[in-house]
Image (cartoon, rainbow, N blue to C red):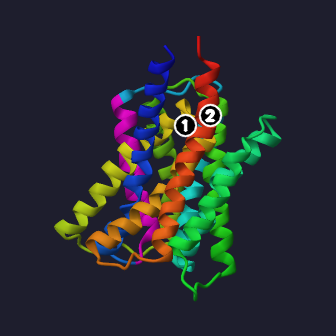
Amino acid sequence: MRNALARSTVADIFLTALAPMIWGSTYIVTSTFLPPDRPFTAALIRVLPAGLLLVALFRTLPPRGQWGKVMVLSLLNIGAFQALLFVAAYRLPGGVAAVVGAIQPLLVMLLSWSVDRRQPAVVAILAALAGVAGMALLLLSPNAQWETVGVLAAFGGACSMALGAWLMRRWQVPLPAMAMTGWQLLLGGVMLAPLAWWQDAPLPALTPVAIAGYVWLCVAGALIAYGLWFRGITRLPSEAVTALGLLSPVTAVVLGWIFLHQALRGSALAGLLIVLISVVVIQRASVQPRVSAKKP
């Protein structure tokens, strides 16, 4: 029984990890395939069609009395997070934004400790701190610019995503995982629509390459990735899920090295290794007590 539970947990971790790995392709797809300077439009196209499709397929409404929770989760996980993410991306070098975002596991541990009265393992805290340090080694350049508004936006995005993951795990809204994913994508997309209309220029005539890029962001980056991410939140501790988010910038760096011939050596390699080790350690420290507690 214990071995079966452990195998199920490993499968949950692997499937959840696929989501940030898919998100790691966003930079290369956006910079290579999509029209420039339309960040909120890209976010809108990414989430709204996927949400509409999932809601139409599953046709399951949130239970009465749960709509408020679904709206809050949609705002935190999609609407506010996507908007703050793109503000940070436009005002900061990608490395600085990713390093600030790497504090998500620490924020979830703080919420668990202060509200749930569940003290995180010391090794998990140390691993989360090491993950931030590893991300800095991997991504920061000596001349990185820390622009105030961009840093605040990146910090706000990290807080939004961390709080959304923690609340989703805490509330456990009784909806099938994919229906819950659909409603969050749909409502979050509706929240993003006025921002895209107000801030971004109209789209030009799209080339087949640009259409393929938007389809990838929508199908893989939203429909599949968010489905796996939200499924993972309901099955794994919140700090374990948010730690897997560190795999997104790692994947972006690796893809840049493979396809764009970007350098990856020295301290960057050391940082990549530290981040990967920190992710593994946080998974073990966060998930192992749950497996042991369910042992017959």
Residue 272 inside the magenta-drawn segment: no
Q: Can you give x and y, in whole percent of width and height, for residue 218 in the image? A: 34, 52
* Range drawn in magenta: 37-57
Compared to residue 143, the image places residue 113 above or below, namely: above
Front-most of residues 59 and 278? 278
Q: Which mark is residue 169?
A: 2
Location of the C terminus by quadrant is top right
Dominant secondary-structure state across the stretch colored magenta: helix
Residue 233, numbered label: 1
Q: Residue at x 76, y 47 (%)?
A: 110
| Amino acid at pointer 2 | Arg
Find out whether the residues at labels 2 and 1 contact each other: C-beta distance under 8 Å. yes
Cα distance, mark 2 to mark 1?
6 Å
Picture residue at 67% right of the left edge, 59% below the top: 129
Q: Residue at x 54, y 50 (%)?
A: 279
Check disc 2 and report its element: helix, strand or loop. Answer: helix
Around disc 1, counting alpha carbons within 10 Å, would you say few (fewer than 14), some (14 to 19), or many (20 or more)?
many
Q: Position of residue 166 (x, y in %)?
A: 65, 41
Tell which of 102 and 278 is nearer to you.
Answer: 278
